[in-house]
Image: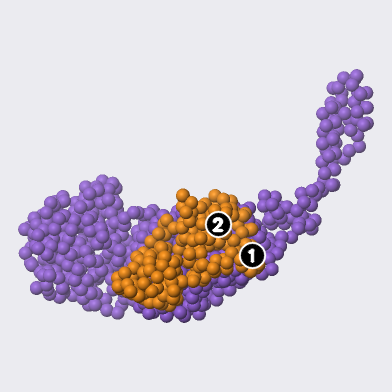
């Protein structure tokens, strides 16, 4: 377990900023008694409270499996990929959101992209290629993705057109349970 | 009725003194059994036929048909194979030379049969083309299969029973007596239909024959003695208590009935209903019951014996029966993400039938029916609930962690209890979720993330390494690896693969783990200082024994109330072993009582360790039974203890050694009490031997 280097930090924050934008500050600068930090362990980035960090150092490296929340992992080439396990934090600070209808829940949970027919609501002024968090109509976060079109263009699209590219969804807990950790 | 139910007649009333047979489905059994005779005329024909039918293993039953009577009733067809089997049996018996007894007995058997014409008449009726087992197409079935006419057999028996027995029988009007009297060398178990005729091994036959004899003889005797009482025998006892892989010659139904009867016998001592087999002791009946339960439910006898002793006989049976059916599916609402009310609503909207689990839990829901897979709903994936057995709620409820505490879960995979703890902590504090199996930590981590627990550190240690890794926890939960005798309904392999060695190993491991758990707790914790030990097992040597061990080895630990409202108290003593009084504060749960998996929960409070003082050491010397004060290996030594020497004793020893040293050199030492008296003599002798020249120098030495 070690702190992130400059480059790594940059990569992570860039990715996060795509989804939560300015709210990124809330992740980094928090209250004193509620301070969190990022740590890297075996190519995975973890986000955990500071007091926990001190306790976690007593666990040896080969025996440590997970700390706090895993945000994602670095690939072999150094690219950071955000994982579904970060959904809690993303959903908390997300700027752009999209709600899908009940009919569209299951297809999304199976890993398909979101079609316009399934769209329930979308935040105004969502630009193109913007990271969004996908919710169901009961405000339960289901995953996140990237918009294919801006909000304005979405209105012009036919019902089968894709509006959000799927990136991660909670169905992965079942589909990828073997490879997740 | 069967497919050939054209000419069915009611069987005639049985002659007094015979008991009808109605239980078994197998025709052979019926034919063998002394069923109500159809006609008296056939008796003679049967006898004649019997003689003619004595051939070794007929290739095809059709041959018999030709030879046999042509009375073509369905009853006959149903019963006919019995003839053949009987013949085979006899011939086989005659062949086998294992014991001389058999030859004689086979003769006896024949004689008996002849002497009971009523029974034989059944055969004769069925003589005709019962031999051919025809399937629906009318083709002959291959050897070993029978075209059973399931409908016919029991109905016949019933009629007979009603006619004969009336109200005289308390227990079911079954053909126990008959069954016991004559064993089938064929199984009645439809699963094993193959062995019907194809008795390949002479050994088997011999064995079966042996059994037949035993049972028959006993059965015959009791039959003659008292017609009204159901006659059972104890074949396992007769066998010498050995376990037999296949119970030859008895149907599963017989075993079941005998088992229930034995439960009655073992349970009630004075009841006139259940007197047991005369001449056999109570423990014999227990042994037979053990074997019967093992046969009927599919356990190995060792495990049955172990589990049977935990309960009175009728409860034991209820326990075993409850292990056959699954417990209800339950889920736990995740209070970090939702409320039980909302979750219930959402699931009901999906069509799931559910109900709150009971008053004792605010987060549990019991699922009755679900059109959607309950482990794959969007709510599940969003982490709103966890599939968890009701019994697994209990140790966490007992632990009752408070916010901002440091908690250790020593064996946490797949994470149901850990996530529950996290929910109770409301994501404050820290949880160490440990599991010794690396592969299982994957599912543990996945569950933790899915349920939104942010305060968990997952590590992969052998749990015995705590507290070396880190200690000072406020609460520790140890859900120890166990034999799983409480969750047999989930995993039936436990029935057969547990041996005595397994229990020994597990108990040893559990004892080590519980000591590690106790040592990992910070006794000075302001809010905590508790250890909860739980297993999903019902055996005493994994539960109360381990708890008692911990109490003995760690005097600063005591048992406290678990906080669980229901459950059976733990045993204070069991089969000669006596445990600490407070063991009654632990709780046991049973599938047949509480409709949840068998479980055991114990809650300890860890207090500060006292420094060993002089008085303590004196006590140590006085009370040999409490070796715990000599705590060298457990690292609880206080320095004073080690450094303390008993000065008086030491001095005496020092004197002794000095004297011995001088004696070696041959120096005389004067003015010493008794122990040295003999030595002085020796020294004198030695002195004499020593050359005179040395005297002076030695004397000088002795002065210094």
Dot 2: what SS?
Answer: helix
Q: Which residue is mark 1?
A: B474
- The residues tagged by marks 1 and 2 sit, at their Cα atoms, a distance apart of 35 Å
Q: Which mark is residue B222?
A: none
Chain ID at mark 1: B
**Position of B216 compared to B696: left or right?**
left
Q: Name the one closer to the observer, B375 or B19.
A: B375
Shown in orange, the chain is A
Q: Name the one closer to the observer, B178 or B44.
A: B178
**Position of B163 compared to B279: left or right?**
left
Circle 1 Cα neighbour tier, 10 Å, few/some/many (<14 / 14–19 / ≥20): many
Q: Name the one closer to the observer, B195 or B675.
A: B195
Colour of chain B as rendered: purple
Q: Residue B535 location in percent, x, y?
A: 51, 63
Q: Name the one closer to the observer, B649 or B113.
A: B649
Circle 2 Cα neighbour tier, 10 Å, few/some/many (<14 / 14–19 / ≥20): some
Q: Nearer the viewer, mark 1 or mark 2?
A: 2
Q: Which residue is mark 2?
A: A9
């Amino acid at each position: 377990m070690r702190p992130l280097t400059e480059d790594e930090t940059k990569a992570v924050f860039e990715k996060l900023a795509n989804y939560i934008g300015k709210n990124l500050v809330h992740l980094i600068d928090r209250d004193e008694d509620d301070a969190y930090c990022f740590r890297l362990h075996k190519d995975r980035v973890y986000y955990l409270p500071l007091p926990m960090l001190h306790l976690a150092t007593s666990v040896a490296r080969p025996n440590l499996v997970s700390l706090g929340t895993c945000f994602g992992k670095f690939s072999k080439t150094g690219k950071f990929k955000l994982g579904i396990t970060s959904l809690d934090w993303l959903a908390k600070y997300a700027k752009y959101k999209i709600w899908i209808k009940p009919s569209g829940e299951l297809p999304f949970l199976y890993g398909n992209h979101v079609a316009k027919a399934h769209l329930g609501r979308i935040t105004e002024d969502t630009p193109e290629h913007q990271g969004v968090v996908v919710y169901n109509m009961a405000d339960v976060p289901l995953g996140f993705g990237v918009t294919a079109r801006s909000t304005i263009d979405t209105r012009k699209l036919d019902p089968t057109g894709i509006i959000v590219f799927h990136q991660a969804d909670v169905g992965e807990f079942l589909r990828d349970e073997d490879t997740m950790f | 009725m069967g497919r050939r139910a054209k000419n069915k007649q009611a069987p005639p009333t049985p002659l007094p003194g015979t008991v009808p047979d109605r239980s078994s489905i197998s025709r052979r059994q019926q034919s063998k059994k002394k069923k109500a005779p159809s006609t008296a005329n056939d008796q003679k024909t049967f006898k004649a036929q019997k003689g003619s039918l004595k051939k070794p293993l007929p290739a095809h039953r059709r041959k018999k048909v030709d030879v046999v009577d042509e009375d073509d009733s369905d009853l006959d067809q149903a019963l006919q194979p019995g003839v053949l089997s009987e013949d085979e049996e006899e011939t086989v018996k005659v062949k086998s030379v294992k014991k001389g007894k058999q030859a004689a007995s086979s003769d006896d058997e024949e004689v008996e049969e002849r002497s009971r014409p009523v029974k034989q008449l059944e055969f004769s009726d069925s003589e005709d083309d019962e031999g051919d087992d025809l399937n629906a197409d009318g083709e002959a079935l291959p050897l070993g299969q029978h075209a059973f006419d399931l409908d016919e057999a029991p109905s016949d028996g019933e009629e007979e029973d009603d006619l004969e027995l009336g109200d005289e029988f308390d227990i079911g009007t079954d053909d126990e007596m008959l069954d016991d009297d004559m064993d089938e060398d064929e199984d009645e178990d439809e699963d094993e239909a193959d062995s019907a005729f194809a008795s390949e091994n002479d050994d088997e036959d011999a064995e079966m024959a042996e059994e037949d004899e035993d049972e028959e003889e006993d059965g015959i005797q009791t039959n003659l003695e008292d017609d009204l009482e159901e006659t059972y025998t104890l074949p396992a006892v007769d066998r010498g208590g050995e376990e037999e892989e296949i119970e030859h010659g008895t149907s599963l139904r017989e075993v079941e009935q005998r088992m229930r009867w034995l439960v009655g016998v073992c349970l009630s001592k004075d009841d006139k209903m259940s007197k047991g087999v005369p001449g056999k002791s109570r423990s014999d009946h227990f042994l037979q019951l053990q074997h019967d339960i093992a046969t009927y439910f599919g356990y190995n006898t060792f495990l049955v014996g172990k589990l049977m002793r935990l309960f009175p006989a009728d409860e034991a049976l209820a326990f075993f029966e409850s292990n056959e059916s699954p417990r209800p599916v339950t889920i736990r609402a995740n209070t970090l993400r939702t409320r039980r009310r909302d979750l219930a609503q959402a699931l009901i909207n999906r069509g799931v039938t559910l109900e709150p689990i009971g008053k004792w839990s605010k987060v549990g829901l019991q699922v009755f029916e679900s059109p959607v897979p309950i482990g794959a709903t969007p709510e599940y994936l969003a982490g709103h609930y966890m599939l968890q057995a009701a019994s697994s709620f209990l140790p966490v409820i007992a632990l009752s962690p408070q916010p901002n505490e440091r908690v250790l879960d020593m064996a946490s995979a797949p994470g149901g209890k850990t996530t529950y703890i996290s929910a109770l902590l409301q994501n404050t504090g820290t949880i160490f979720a440990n599991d010794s199996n690396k592969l299982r930590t994957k599912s543990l981590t996945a569950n933790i993330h899915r349920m939104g627990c942010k305060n968990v550190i997952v590590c992969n240690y052998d749990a015995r390494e705590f507290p070396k890794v880190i200690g000072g926890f406020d609460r520790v939960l140890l859900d120890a690896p166990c034999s799983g005798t409480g969750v047999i309904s989930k995993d039936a392999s436990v029935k057969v693969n547990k041996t005595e060695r397994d229990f020994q190993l597990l108990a040893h491991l559990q004892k080590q783990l519980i000591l590690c758990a106790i040592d990992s707790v910070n006794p000075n914790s302001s809010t905590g200082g508790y250890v909860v030990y739980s297993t999903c097992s019902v055996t005493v040597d994994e539960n109360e024994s381990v708890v008692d061990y911990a109490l003995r080895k760690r005097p600063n630990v005591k048992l406290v109330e678990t906080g669980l409202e229901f459950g059976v108290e733990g045993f204070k003593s069991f089969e000669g072993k006596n445990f600490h009084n407070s063991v009654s504060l632990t709780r046991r749960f049973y599938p047949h009582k509480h409709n949840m998996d068998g479980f055991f929960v114990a809650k300890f409070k860890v207090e500060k360790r006292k420094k060993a003082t002089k008085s303590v050491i004196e006590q140590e010397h006085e009370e040999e039974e409490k070796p715990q004060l000599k705590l060298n290996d457990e690292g609880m030594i206080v320095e004073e203890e080690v450094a303390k020497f008993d000065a008086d004793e030491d001095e005496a020893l020092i004197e002794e050694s000095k004297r011995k040293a001088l004696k070696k050199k041959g120096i005389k030492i004067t003015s010493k009490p008794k122990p040295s008296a003999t030595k002085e003599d020796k020294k004198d002798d030695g002195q004499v031997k020593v050359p005179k020249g040395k005297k002076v120098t030695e004397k000088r030495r002795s002065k210094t």
